[in-house]
Image (cartoon, rainbow, N blue to C red):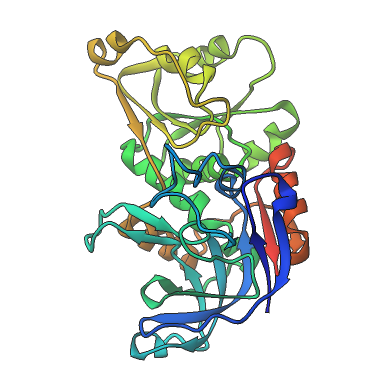
Amino acid sequence: MRAVRLVAHGGPESLELHDVDVPDPGPAEVLVRVAACGLNNTDVWTREGSYGAPGPPAGWLGPLDFPRIQGADVVGEVVAAGGAPGQDLVGHRVLVDPAIYSGAGPDALPVDILGSERDGGYAEQVVVPASCAHPVDDSPLEDVELACLPISYGTALGMVDRGGVRDGETVLVTGASGGVGLAAVQVAAARGARVVAVSSGDKTERVREAGADEVLDRDAGDLATAVRDAAPGGVDVTVDVVAGPLLEQLADLLAPGGRWVVAGALAGHEVRLDVRALYLRNLRLVGSTMHTPAQFAELVEMARGGRLRPVVARTFPLAEAALAQAELETRRHVGKLVLVP
């Protein structure tokens, strides 16, 4: 089969197309023919060495082993099973949960990610645990739409849950045109929140169409004043994938008891923060990585019911994985980029 392998940390040229052996599923695994695989910022950060390099942070389980086939967001058909646990899945379209968790409970946390600690979906076929393959034969979503869900929408759902978003609250979403940001707009709106989104001027209408009540241009003047005008009572929850100076700039706009949930650092990972504001106003600063088993199960039900319609910005053939990652880094698109093997 064909697969794109990451051979070292570096630029897009570190991704190489190869002919490799089809992997054999183990006793509790299944072989999935990949129909589509979504791209994520974590793919780029892992390729560059921001994740998975020696030293902190070193990914979930330590430095990466090379070569590695990236790709966490997989949808496809189960074509073989290595044992009894996966036999009933053969022939079914499945959405793959990319995570291996810290325990068996519904609130366990991810410790191992498809495409990082083990080979993923930048390939024509991939082996995954049978327990991670969720049938979605009845979903009205197309394969490329389903491939947008696991990381971006799982992360957004985890952020919204950990932020305790409630009906009628005001939610500020940063980086709202990207995969996680746009997913957060849709998920928060589905929870009944009033969504104020931050994006760039040429993308604001697409973000509004996704469900934002107000969209602020991050490049048009004083952003803090614009947020204050849009949320005069304060922001109840900020869903943030940008961090950096934006966190410093906007944290004071949280209402008393507000929550700031962060799952990315597009603008920088080091910030200055006056902790007195945290305790004097009963604020919460929450780190959030991906989803729990219970949250992914909820996401699968949303997919089966067509309750979310992901935005696909562009698709690429497998051989253009390096080009796709380079395009992802430009952040010119709205929604998700997807590989179609």
Q: Say left or right for 20 vs 73.
A: right
Quadrant hosting residue 32: bottom right
Residue 251: horizontal and vertical position, in percent?
42, 16
Residue drawn at x 23%, y 14% as measured from the top left: 279
Using the image, determine if residue 75 lies above or below residue 45.
below
Front position in the image: 198 or 43? 43
Using the image, determine if residue 336 lies above or below residue 70.
above
Quadrant hosting residue 126: bottom right
Q: How many marks?
A: 0
Residue 138 seen anywhere in this rendered image of the structure:
no
Using the image, determine if residue 60 lies above or below residue 340.
above
Residue 83: horizontal and vertical position, in percent?
37, 89
Q: Say left or right for 293 vs 43.
A: left
Q: Say left or right for 103 vs 55.
A: left
Residue drawn at x 39%, y 41% as measured from the top left: 159
Residue drawn at x 57%, y 26% as measured from the top left: 267
Is the C terminus in the top left, top right, bottom left or bottom right quadrant? bottom right
Front position in the image: 185 or 25? 25
Residue 84: horizontal and vertical position, in percent?
34, 91
Residue 326: horizontal and vertical position, in percent?
74, 45
Is the N terminus in the top left, top right, bottom left or bottom right quadrant? bottom right
Using the image, determine if residue 178 lies above or below residue 31.
above
